[in-house]
Amino acid sequence: MENFFEPCVLSLLMLKPSYGYELKNDLDEKCGCQADIGNLYRSLSKLQKSGYVLKKKVVSEVGPAKQVYEITKKGKGLLGEWIEELEDEVKLIKKLINNYKKNI
């Protein structure tokens, strides 16, 4: 897992399709991830090129058209793999913490 916010982005896109700045705000508010907008767009581009995310142009009633991102079936599979990895990491971290607490 290169960037922690990539699984967060995919998890947010599971909730609803979103555009970049909305994702940036949701990453901070809902995931606790602070992402630079440039890094976010690079990650979205990488996820799109890999087939995990689709990008669609949506015409807006107010202002210019927006690029909206949505997760694909392949992206849901990747997110599931990342969640499994994170669950394994949580188990290891809990063991470390418990061993530490036993010995202080």
Image (tube, rainbow, N blue to C red):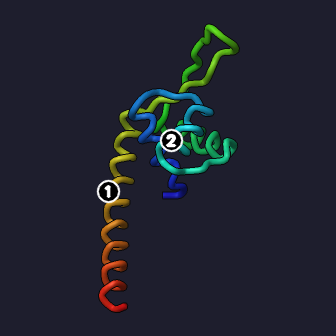
Q: Quadrant of the C terminus?
A: bottom left
Q: Few, some or many C-alpha atoms within 10 Å of disc 2 (few <14, some 14-19, many ≥20)? A: few
Q: Which residue is mark 2?
A: 50
**Alpha carbon distance from label 2 to label 1:** 20 Å
Q: Amino acid at mark 1?
A: Glu
Q: What numbered label is drawn on residue 37?
A: none
User: Label 1 neighbourhood size at 10 Å, few (<14), some (14-19), many (20+)?
Assistant: few
Say which amino acid is labelled 2: Ser
Depth check, front residue: 82 or 60? 60
When the figure is inspected, residue 56 is found, relative to residue 43, above or below; the finding is above
- Relative to 87, residue 6 above or below: above
Image marks 2 and 1: residues in contact by CB distance under 8 Å: no
Does 101 sit above or below residue 61? below
Q: Tell which residue pokes out farthest to the bottom in this image.
A: 103
Q: Quadrant of residue 84?
A: bottom left
Q: Please state the horizontal and vertical placement of residue 10, each as a whole percent of the image.
A: 45, 41
The front one of 23 and 2 is 23
Residue 56 versus residue 42 in the image, above or below:
above
User: In the visual, does 91 lie left or right of 30?
Assistant: left
Q: Residue at x 32, y 65 (%)?
A: 88
Instruction: Determine whether, in the image, residue 85 is placed left or right of residue 2.
Output: left
Q: Position of residue 6 (x, y in %)?
A: 51, 48
Q: Which residue is mark 1?
A: 84
Left or right: 103, with 51 as reference point: left
**Labels 2 and 1: the sequence-earlier one:** 2
Judged from this view, the residue extending furthest toward the top is: 61
Q: Mark 2: which secondary structure?
A: loop
Give the residue displayed 39% in from the left and 32% down from the top: 15
**Of labels 2 and 1, the one closer to you:** 1
Between 17 and 101, the one nearer to me in the picture: 101
Picture coordinates of residue 49, whole percent (x, y): 55, 38
Left or right of 17? Residue 85 is left
